[in-house]
Amino acid sequence: MTNIHPSAIVHKDAQIGANVKIGPYCIIGAKVSLGDDCELMSHVVIDGNTTIGPRAKIFPFACLGQQPQDLKYHGEDSRLEVGADAMIREYVTMNAGTEGGGMLTKIGDKFVGLSSVHIGHDCILGDGIIISSATLLAGHCRIADHVIFGGGSSIHQFARVGRNAFIGGATAVEGDVIPFGLVIGNRATLVGLNLVGLKRHGFERERIFALRAAYGQIFEGEGALRDRVAAVAASSAGNADVMEVVNFIQAASERPLCMPAR
């Protein structure tokens, strides 16, 4: 049974699923869709063309779906989509997309965003991402599955972060972070693989050893980076994990690659 507090303002055209709880002083706009079993605790504002997946738990003073913080935005009907089972803590902000970025900001399933996280316009996030408090994602970022952000980190616009990477606390990331990578510092440097994260996600020793060997060849070997990457691609063509790193590096990007400090 849906339960809406008398002080909440819910537009008559909003789509409210089954068993939704909307707490005191929440404001829900006309184009908002809330999935089944969502809970908005209090003082939550959701506006714009915004879809929240089922079983989301949204804490006080979160603000979702407002117009993007982009001076080129001129009122286009862009969207914000949040997947299933999200936990969105206090003061989190997520902006809708822009015409220049595909009209969509998208958050995958099982997202965890701790207090004061900002996700800018046109960001595309995968599943199982955890973002610690006071972390800032600028517009157009691409974040793959199971990335973890330490508190107070920040990501440059258009940057990519590969699957199962870890961003250290208070780290400023200007470049792309390889899948399984670990970056720390201001500005961020690549300091190895996210071994803790790989073990937590069930990577066997053989998979980790193969990734460590490839990492050494790519980032610690002699010669030009492109030649080292090509050599790893030739010797590890049958290894899906290693080729994920290779393909990430070889893909076209707006940003340079995060590299180890020399």
Image: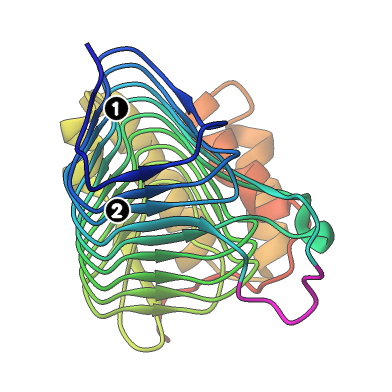
Q: How many marks?
A: 2
Q: Determine the image quadrant of residue 13.
A: top right
Q: Which circle marks residue 1 in the picture?
A: none
Q: Horizontal placement of 93 versus 106: left or right?
A: left
Considering only order in the chain, which callout, 2 or 1, is on the residue closer to the N terminus? 2
Q: Horizontal placement of 57 versus 253: left or right?
A: left
The magenta span reads 69-74
User: Residue 218 at what x, y percent from top left?
Assistant: 53, 58
User: Residue 98 at what x, y percent from top left?
Assistant: 74, 60
**What residue type is disc 2 on?**
Val
Residue at horizontal 51%, vertical 46%?
29
Label 1: how many residues lie within 10 Å, few (<14), some (14-19) or many (20+)?
many
Kindly identify which residue carries mark 1.
85
Label 2: how many residues lie within 10 Å, few (<14), some (14-19) or many (20+)?
many
Kindly identify which residue carries mark 2.
44
User: Residue 44 at what x, y percent from top left?
Assistant: 29, 53
Vertical position of residue 104 compared to residue 224: above or below = above
Cα distance in 3D space between marks 1 and 2: 17 Å
Q: Secondary structure at mark 1?
A: loop
On the rendered image, what quadrant is the C terminus found in?
bottom left
**Mark 1 or 2, closer to the camera:** 2
Vertical position of residue 38 compared to residue 17: above or below = below
Q: Main secondary structure of the magenta part?
A: loop
Q: Are marks 1 and 2 in contact (CB under 8 Å)?
A: no
Q: Secondary structure at mark 2?
A: loop
**What residue type is disc 1 on?**
Asp
Residue at horizontal 20%, vertical 63%?
115
Residue at horizontal 65%, vertical 71%?
223
User: Residue 37 at what x, y percent from top left?
Assistant: 26, 19
